[in-house]
Image (cartoon, rainbow, N blue to C red):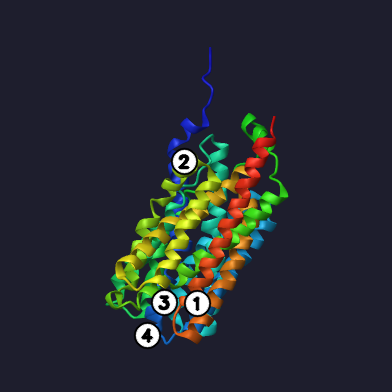
């Protein structure tokens, strides 16, 4: 009697969708609501809660300080079961800290809550992506996180729509409470459908993964520096794009809807960038994404034209998710047995940029009354990232030429 061999990819197709949907919900909760809702809420808090430009920048910095703290902890933990526990704690923290923002108007308390909220975002952006990628690799699926990272774009859309729907009916404090309640909708599948990581098994698949050679130190150093530049470019727009566009005459008090446009552009972009990377390679795809995001940063500096500034929002939404997805997938492929730990090490540079940049932008805006200088600095940093990516491409070509 013959037995048909078990094919992990075929047998687990339904579970694959559940695992990826859990990751999407984790991103919507911990990043879309706990992190990104701050962006459309920023002009509302300026008007109703007396939040200053300087305080707004520092609150964003505390948020990213929490994120980098979580990344450091994740990088120091090698055990996948422990990462799974941390993931679930992050889900709880995201719901609690989002709702709690509406229970106080104390700036120091806001800073603590934004720090804890940033800590929770590690669960969706870092731990869930690593756990999901590990599951995909173990079960014979293509190691791509495009579907997973649609949660970033969806999170933006959901947070923007939620704030837009509540802003005419509820106070700023009630809106934060409402966002916390909305988070429970995504908490349940994120908690239930991402399975605990299985113990390592001596299958041919895992043996093959163990033979993957670590990348050269120069390659890692360049990628870490590139991701620092990406973090700088991402955070300035993520934090201030609504506040910037809200000051344009045709978009006054409608800046929150621009955030929805960003999300609509971001949601499908990870699929697009997966396909671009398949066709032209990961590093060239990253270089293209950097270039387009730099254009999105320059446009608000160069013009006050409403259409071009909306194009800026579309370009930003269509690139920042791709940069995250391409970079984390790239690093995960080089460390298939425990991608979450490798992702955490890389993410430290992204987090450092996210601590520095908002405080810089808030301080510059407080002194000049606008974000022009901060955007100019950010564009320069992104161009530096493109130069570093060019160096990675040259190294890859030299290596390919040197092979017999």
> Is 16 drawn above or below residue 126 in the view shown?
above
Work out how far the residue at label 4 is from the one at label 2, CA to CA, in angstroms: 44 Å
Q: Earlier in the sequence, mark 1 or mark 4?
A: 4
Q: Are marks 3 and 2 in contact (CB under 8 Å)?
A: no
Residue bearing the label numbered 4: 48
Which comes before the other along the chain, label 3 or label 2?
Answer: 2
- Vertical relation: 18 (above or below) 30: above
- Secondary element under disc 1, as helix, strand or loop, is helix
- Residue at the image point whose x is 52% and y is 55% from the top: 324
Looking at the image, is mark 1 or mark 4 nearer the viewer? 1
User: At 54% from the left edge and 84% from the top edge, which residue is drawn?
Assistant: 108
Earlier-in-chain disc, 1 versus 2: 2
How far across and down, in percent of the image, does residue 333 sit?
60, 43
Q: Secondary structure at mark 2?
A: helix
Mark sitting earlier along the chain (3/1):
3
Which numbered circle lies on residue 42?
A: 3
Q: Nearer the viewer, residue 38 or 354?
A: 354
Tag shown at residue 16: 2
144 vs 154, left or right, is right
On residue 373, the disc is 1
């Amino acid at each position: 009697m013959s037995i048909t061999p078990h094919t992990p990819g075929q047998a687990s197709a339904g579970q694959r969708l559940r695992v990826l949907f859990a990751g999407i919900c984790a991103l919507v909760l911990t990043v879309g609501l706990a992190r990104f809702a701050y962006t459309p809420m920023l002009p509302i808090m300026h008007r109703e809660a007396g939040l200053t430009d300087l305080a707004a920048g520092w609150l964003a910095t505390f948020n990213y300080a929490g994120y980098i703290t979580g990344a450091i902890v994740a990088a120091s933990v090698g055990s996948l079961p422990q990462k799974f526990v941390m993931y679930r704690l992050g889900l709880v923290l995201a719901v609690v800290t989002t709702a709690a923002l509406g229970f106080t108007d104390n700036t120091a308390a806001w800073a603590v809550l934004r720090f804890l909220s940033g800590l929770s975002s590690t669960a969706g952006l870092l731990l869930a992506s690593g756990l999901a990628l590990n599951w995909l690799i173990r079960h014979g699926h293509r190691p791509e996180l495009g579907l997973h990272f649609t949660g970033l774009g969806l999170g933006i859309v959901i947070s923007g729509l939620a704030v837009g729907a509540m802003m005419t009916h509820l106070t700023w404090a009630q809106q934060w409470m409402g966002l916390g309640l909305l988070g429970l909708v995504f908490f349940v599948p994120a908690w239930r459908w991402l399975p605990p990581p299985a113990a390592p098994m001596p299958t041919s698949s895992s043996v093959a993964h163990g033979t993957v050679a670590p990348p050269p130190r120069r390659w890692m150093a360049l990628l870490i520096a590139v991701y620092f530049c990406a973090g700088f470019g991402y955070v300035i727009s993520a934090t201030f794009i609504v506040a910037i566009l809200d000051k344009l005459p045709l978009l006054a008090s409608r800046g929150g809807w621009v955030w929805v446009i960003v999300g609509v552009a971001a949601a499908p972009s990870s699929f697009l960038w997966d396909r671009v990377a398949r066709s032209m390679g990961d590093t060239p795809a990253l270089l293209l994404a950097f270039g387009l995001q730099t254009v999105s940063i320059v446009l608000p500096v160069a013009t006050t034209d409403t259409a071009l500034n909306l194009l800026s929002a579309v370009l930003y939404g269509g690139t920042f998710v791709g940069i995250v997805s391409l970079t984390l997938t790239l690093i995960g492929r080089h460390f298939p047995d425990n991608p979450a730990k490798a992702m955490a090490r890389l993410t430290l540079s992204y987090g450092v940029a996210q601590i520095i940049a908002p405080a810089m932008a808030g301080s510059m805006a407080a002194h000049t009354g606008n974000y022009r200088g901060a955007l100019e600095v950010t564009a320069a940093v992104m161009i530096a990232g493109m130069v570093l990516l060019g160096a990675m491409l040259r190294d890859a070509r030299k290596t390919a030429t040197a092979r017999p």
